[in-house]
Image: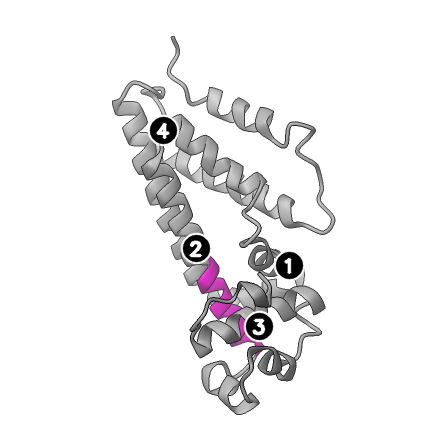
Amino acid sequence: MDQAAWRDGATTRQRILEAAALSFVSLGYRHARLAQVARSAGVSRSTLYEYYPGKEQLLIALNHWLIEVLVAQVRDTLESAPSTLEGLQCWLRTGVEPEPVHRPLLKIIYADDVQPSLLLDREATQRSIRDAQKWVRRALRRGIDAGELRADLGIAETAHSLQNLHSLFTRQAVADYPLFDFGPDKGATTIDIVLRGLKRPI
């Protein structure tokens, strides 16, 4: 997400959010200044304050932006896949290898220094998790009905666990100091092991 990627005719709100994302990634949330965000967005400080009175409001708006992107991603990935297992595999891979355009927002939202502020937006985050799990549950139900997945799967519990794994993968993928790496196959074996546990025995 760089300035060249801004869309022609982007709204003032979009320009401010993209400038904030650039600033938070390059300087860190704690050291970023609203004056710099305003300059990068090409707006006055008073205009910025009309939209976002402070950094916390900007952070929460970025969180909402990311939520929209990620919920749409899980929906589109699972709904368009030829099979449930292929859809789940593609979706889990987006955790291991997030799309480059999403990485700046993910780095911001997963940074340790923003977590206290994001607690103010806890309901939106929890709602996004519920929305994502809804699409995972739908995919699991289709897979069971098609005989692709084990009939004894607990759909709600499995969706919850897969969502947790996706979040863990994503946090590791964008961390400055990851706790582990995905190996030379970039997580393919890890994902395969997970999906083997879902398959209907032959």
Mark 3: few/some/many CA within 10 Å (<14, 14-19, 20+): many
Q: Is residue 126 visible?
A: no
Q: Quadrant of the N terminus?
A: bottom right
Q: Mark 1 — residue?
A: 111
- Give the residue drawn at x 48%, y 20%: 196
Q: Is residue 16 visible?
A: yes
Residue type, mark 1 in image: Ala
Q: Is residue 138 left or right of residue 190?
A: left
Does residue 130 belong to the magenta stretch?
no
- Give the residue drawn at x 52%, y 91%: 46
Q: Nearer the viewer, mark 3 or mark 1?
A: 3
Q: Mark 4 — residue?
A: 84
Residue 51 on image: x %, y %? 46, 82
Disc assigned to residue 69: 2
Q: Quadrant of the C terminus?
A: top left
In 3D space, how far apart are the residues under numbered discs 1 and 2 (Cα atoms)?
18 Å
In 3D space, how far apart are the residues under numbered discs 3 and 1 (Cα atoms)?
18 Å
- Give the residue drawn at x 54%, y 54%: 101
**SS type, badge 1:** loop
- Give the residue drawn at x 41%, y 47%: 73
- Picture quadrant where residue 116 is located: bottom right
Residue type, mark 2 in image: Val
In 3D space, how far apart are the residues under numbered discs 4 and 2 (Cα atoms)?
21 Å
Most common secondary structure along the magenta stretch: helix
| Stretch of the chain drawn in magenta | 55-66
- Picture quadrant where residue 156 is located: top left
In 3D space, how far apart are the residues under numbered discs 3 and 2 (Cα atoms)?
18 Å
Q: Is residue 91 left or right of residue 139?
A: right
Residue type, mark 4 in image: Thr
Disc assigned to residue 19: 3
